[in-house]
Every structure is written in C-alpha cells, then in structure tokens.
Amino acid sequence: MNKASLIDRSKLTTPRAAAVAGIIFSILLITSLVLIRISVPADPRVEGDWIYVNWKSINLALNLLPFAGIAFLWFIGVVRDRVGEHEDRFFATVFLGSGLLFLAMLFASAAVAGGIISIFGSTPGRLIESGVYTFGRIVVYEIMNVYTMKMAGVFMISTSTLALRTSIFSRWMAFLGMALALFLLLSLGFVYWAPLVFPLWVLLISIYILQANFGRKEVKSIKADPL
C-alpha cells in the first residue's frame, strides 16, 4: 500500500472516528446527567438525607464521566482535523480553549462529588454534621451548572461559527447550535434539565457526520466500479 492510499484512507476514516467518539460522549454524558438529575435535589441547600438512598446511582454516574471526557477529547481532535487547512485561528482557539475548559471543569466537579461520596462511604453521619457536604455540594453545583455549561455554550457557538465558514456540517445545524447555545447560557438555574442540550447537540452533529461519511464512501465506490 503506497503513501497516497494511506493518506486517502486517513481522510475517509477521520470523520467516522469523529462521529463515533461524539456518539459515545453523548450517550455517556446523557446517562450520567440523567442519573444525577433524578438522584440529586435541584436546590443545593437541601439537607443530605437523599444521599443515603441514591449514592449508588450517583457513584455510577461519576464513573461514567471519565470515559465521556476521553471520547469528547477525541471528538475535539478529529473535528478540528476535519476543518483542516480552512481553520480560522481565532475561532479555532476559542473552539479548542472552550472545549478543554469544559472538560477540565467537568472533571473537577466530578472529583469533588466523588470525594463527597467516598467520605460518605466511610463516615456517613460525620459527613453531614461536619459541613463538608454543604460546602462540596455548593461547589459542585456552581462549577457544573454555571461554569462548565457556560463553556459548553461557548464551544457550541465557536463550533457552529466554524461550520458556517467551512461547511463541516449543514448550515441549519450551525444556526440551531447557536440558538441552543444561547438557551444554555441564559437558562441555567431556571431550567433544571438544560445541560442535556449540549450532549444532544453533539449527538446530532455526530450522526450527521457519520451519515455524510457513509454517503461519500458509497459515491466513491460507485465511481470506482460503474458496472
């Protein structure tokens, strides 16, 4: 196999890899968010009695987040590769920076929450009485629902802008991404399920890229074998 065919194969498989990584990220993050949303009270000031019943569900949700983060990191890399030489340095910097900040804060909030669950497992009564629970709960709430999701909104806007400039996916999906990003930026604290907007949008993009890649592969196969 010569060098030219290797390069061509890389161009064909990269979009599919992006789609698969995005789908894995979306499914894992949606599952994690749903488990957390149905297990944790919306108000961070609520007392910690609920943790006695729901700590296993929360622990499962937290264990899914590292794998979601790995898939998202791969998704960032391959989408940027899809943009290729048409990359705009300004928007690419915002795209990469917001994606990495989203990932860092997602991991930070998960680490704090995981620490609370670990302390609860060893000394459940002392955790509630010491004030560590209240502090950790509010910190996780602020990081996850304010800063992390705002970075997700910035990531959506920058990705949509790159799409409008480079046509990496349809224009209507780019405009939808901008609208959903504004909703995400403005609705936090008022709409409890608003964070689900981000993984659902990534899932939509990933499915589109996967379908476009298969369609392009079929067209090339027909051209290579017209009979």
Image (cartoon, grey):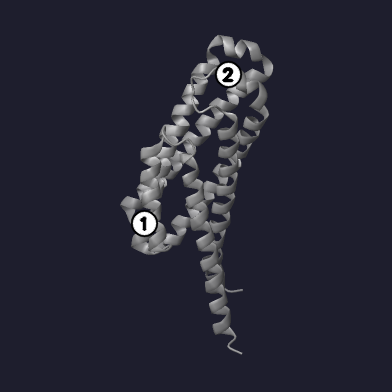
Look at mark 1 in the image and give the residue it sits on.
175
On screen, 25 above or below 208? Answer: above
Question: Seen in the image, is 119 located left or right of residue 151?
Answer: right
On screen, 181 above or below 84? Answer: above
Q: Determine the residue positioned at 36% across, 48% down.
A: 93
Q: Quadrant of residue 36?
A: top right
Label 1 residue SS: helix
Question: Seen in the image, is 183 located left or right of residue 224?
Answer: left
Residue 74's disc number: none
Look at mark 2 in the image and give the residue it sits on.
48
Label 2 residue SS: helix
Q: How far across and down, in percent of the image, does residue 108 sit?
A: 50, 31
Q: Quadrant of residue 226?
A: bottom right
Any part of residue 154 in sight: no
Residue neighbourhood size for the residue with mark 2, other residues' Cα within 10 Å, grouped as few (<14), some (14–19), many (≥20): some
On screen, 156 above or below 145? Answer: below
Q: How far across and down, in percent of the image, does residue 153 sit?
A: 40, 44
Q: How far across and down, in percent of the image, does residue 88 sit?
A: 33, 56
Q: How many marks?
A: 2
The CA span between labels 2 and 1 is 41 Å
Residue neighbourhood size for the residue with mark 1, other residues' Cα within 10 Å, grouped as few (<14), some (14–19), many (≥20): some
Mark 2 / mark 1, whichever is N-terminal: 2
Any part of residue 117 in sight: yes
Residue type, label 1: Phe
Question: Seen in the image, is 70 located left or right of residue 182?
Answer: right
